[in-house]
Image (spheres, helix red, strand yellow):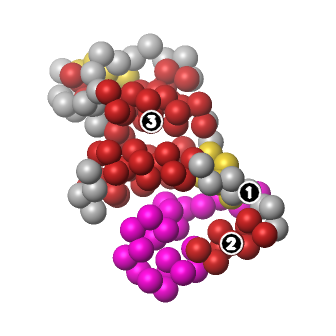
């Protein structure tokens, strides 16, 4: 199996470089024809969230929809799909930043009961504890 980097997913989603976007589309078509799965690490999803939010100022609902649509693509195999489903569900109903939510769900899946942070905004979430 081959993994995808953040920039490949971003090019596919935003098509800001048409040549690279076409290359991604061709890659996806080949994978589909060859019945090959492409692996998307959880850290790539985290970076995609960050890039779409910070670089492209994409609204939260559009980011969640983009991730949900990617999850529907049979050629993409996501690390910790259960964590992503929790993100998609909780991301619609709470105001915690999506990157922080993904961190929280990932940590909870690993058995953690809290995360320590200096981020005052993240610390508004019950999972995060502010380090003073």
Which residue is disc 2 drawn over?
29
Crowdedness near tag 3: few (<14), some (14–19) or many (≥20) residues, C-alpha within 10 Å: many
Where disc 1 sits, the SS reads loop
Residue 16 visible in this rendered orientation of the protein: yes
Question: Is 100 rendered above or below residue 57?
Answer: above
Crowdedness near tag 1: few (<14), some (14–19) or many (≥20) residues, C-alpha within 10 Å: some
Question: Residue 21, percent across and down?
Answer: 50, 77
Is 15 included in the stretch rendered in magenta? yes
Main SS, magenta residues: helix
Which residue is disc 3 drawn over?
88
Is 19 included in the stretch rendered in magenta? yes
Q: Name the residue rendered at 50%, 80% in the picture.
A: 20
Where disc 2 sits, the SS reads helix
Q: Name the residue rendered at 31%, 21% in the picture.
A: 128
Question: Is 73 rendered above or below residue 110?
Answer: below
Compare marks 1 and 3 and give the one earlier in the sequence.
1
Q: Name the residue rendered at 17%, 28% in the picture.
A: 120
Residue 45 visible in this rendered orientation of the protein: no
Compare marks 2 and 3 and give the one earlier in the sequence.
2
Which residue is disc 1 drawn over?
37
Magenta segment boundaries in residue numbering:
1-24
Residue 130's image quarter?
A: top left
């Amino acid at each position: 199996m081959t993994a995808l980097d953040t920039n490949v997913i971003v090019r596919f989603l935003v098509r800001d470089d048409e040549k690279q976007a076409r290359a991604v589309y061709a890659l996806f078509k080949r994978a589909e024809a060859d019945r090959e799965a492409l692996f998307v690490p959880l850290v790539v999803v985290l970076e995609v969230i960050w890039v779409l939010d910070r670089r492209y100022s994409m609204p939260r609902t559009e980011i969640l929809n983009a991730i949900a649509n990617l999850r529907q693509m049979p050629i993409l195999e996501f690390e910790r799909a259960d964590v992503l489903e929790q993100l998609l569900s909780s991301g619609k109903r709470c105001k915690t930043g999506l990157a922080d939510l993904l961190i929280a769900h990932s940590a909870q899946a690993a058995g953690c009961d809290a995360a320590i942070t200096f981020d005052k905004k993240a610390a508004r979430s019950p999972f995060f504890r502010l380090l003073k």
